[in-house]
Image (cartoon, grey):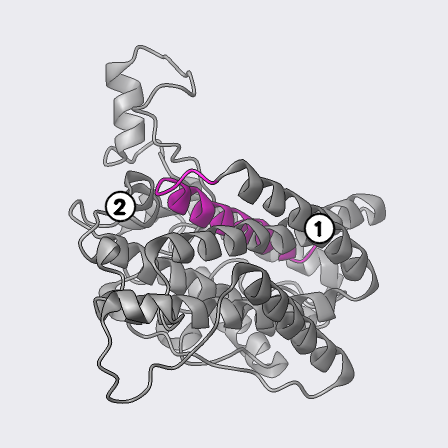
Amino acid sequence: MLQHSLLVGVAPQITRRVGYNALVLSSVRLSASRSFSSCARRYNHLNDRQATAAAVGPHKNDTSSPSLALTATNHGGDISHQNPAHHGDWVLFHPVYTPEELKAVEVLHREATCFSDKLAANLVKISRWGYDLVSGYKHKVIPPGADMTLQQLRKEGYVLDEKQWLERILFLESIAGVPGMVAATLRHLQSLRLMRRDNGWIHTCLEEAENERMHLMTFMTLRNPSIFFRAMILGAQGVFYNMFFLSYLISPRACHRFVGYLEEEAVLTYTKCIKEVEAGRVPEWSDMPAPQIAIDYWRLEPGAKLLDVIYAVRSDETTHRFVNHSLANLDVKTDVNPFALQEPDMHIKGKKIAFERPEAEQYFKETRHILQKIPADS
């Protein structure tokens, strides 16, 4: 068991739960005042300054953060949310990807092998079918050799225009931010009720929820949705939140599997979007600059384009696909979250659908070994 692996070389004579506490406290000491940001692999081999900036927003030692610098030097303590110079760079840990990692994503699918997995997969299919029907989206393959203009392709429903892409992305991201928050809330309350540690699951669930919210905030800069569209999101979120809440009470494992399948669809959607933009079928986005919020969040180059943002978002969805399918393979009541302190880079997450339970245990042992080797003053 993963819990048992915590005891080896840490505290064999004490209880499993105390063994986990010792590991976390040891990790905090080893990484000094940086929380866990000194674990370089989590941030894909970027230098320490970039990793710290990407992990926690305006870190006290991060002079490269535009929002921190502007707040400190230009506005005399003005913290009004209406101040346009504040970029809202207050975020949890999240990966920052290298150019190679952005290209390492593959469209993958995990075959359902048991009843709960098949139920989760079918629910995702039904949900997608319903949204496709409401939004008028049809996945039509362009006939080989078809000599059609872009306008004709759009009229016949072969490709989406930029407005249709935005509507689809905004709706999906407004829903995608729900599961992580529900899971984190329920696990947080359970930890309080039972007065015991959560084994590292809460943080990863919260990170996922905020990451999806940041996707929404990014694409919101491109369009202000209508009142009707906002009402549709409100209704869908209300239904989905409560259904997922009740479902997580019954079977957390099935819910993580559901999210894994949902993220498979998200990776597929963004992959198709990338191909359409690169093929020139969404010319409005071909040379559009990346929103400032995206440059701040993913630490993109100043001249980054919207296409770079879509690549980064797809990589995030790939992370959620991998993490949720992996968590669904664990014992949600007893196993430690192997990604609490470190995540694999995209060369693993982008090409592998999930860790099986023995692989997750081995990965956790490797993470612990890395942390124990880091000098206390690093």
The answer to whether residue 305 is seen in the rendering is yes
Residue 241's disc is: 1
Residue 9 visible in image = no
- In terms of image quadrants, where is residue 60? top left
Earlier residue among tags 1 and 2:
2
Judge the density around disc 1: few (<14), some (14-19), many (≥20) Cα neighbours within 10 Å.
some
Residue 322: percent from left, percent from top: 51, 71
Residue 253 spot, x, y in % from top left: 72, 69
Of residue 57 and residue 276, the one placed in the foreground of this image is: 276
Magenta stretch bounds: 198-225
- Which residue is rendered at x = 26% and y = 45% of the image? 49
Residue at the outermost top position: 76
Of circles 1 and 2, the one toward us is 1
User: Would you say residue 212 sits in the magenta stretch?
Assistant: yes
Q: Residue at x 58, y 49 (%)?
A: 206
Q: Nearer the viewer, residue 275 or 212?
A: 275
Hey, what amino acid is under mark 2? Arg
- Amino acid type of the residue tagged 1 in the rendering: Tyr
x, y percent for residue 76: 31, 10
Q: Position of residue 305 (x, y in %)?
A: 21, 52
Q: Secondary structure at mark 2?
A: helix
Magenta region, main secondary structure: helix
Image quadrant assignment for residue 79: top left
- SS type, badge 1: helix
Residue 333, quarter of the rendered image? bottom right
Reading the image, the residue beneath label 2 is: 49
Distance of label 1 from label 2 (alpha carbons): 38 Å
Relative to residue 39, is residue 63 drawn left or right?
left
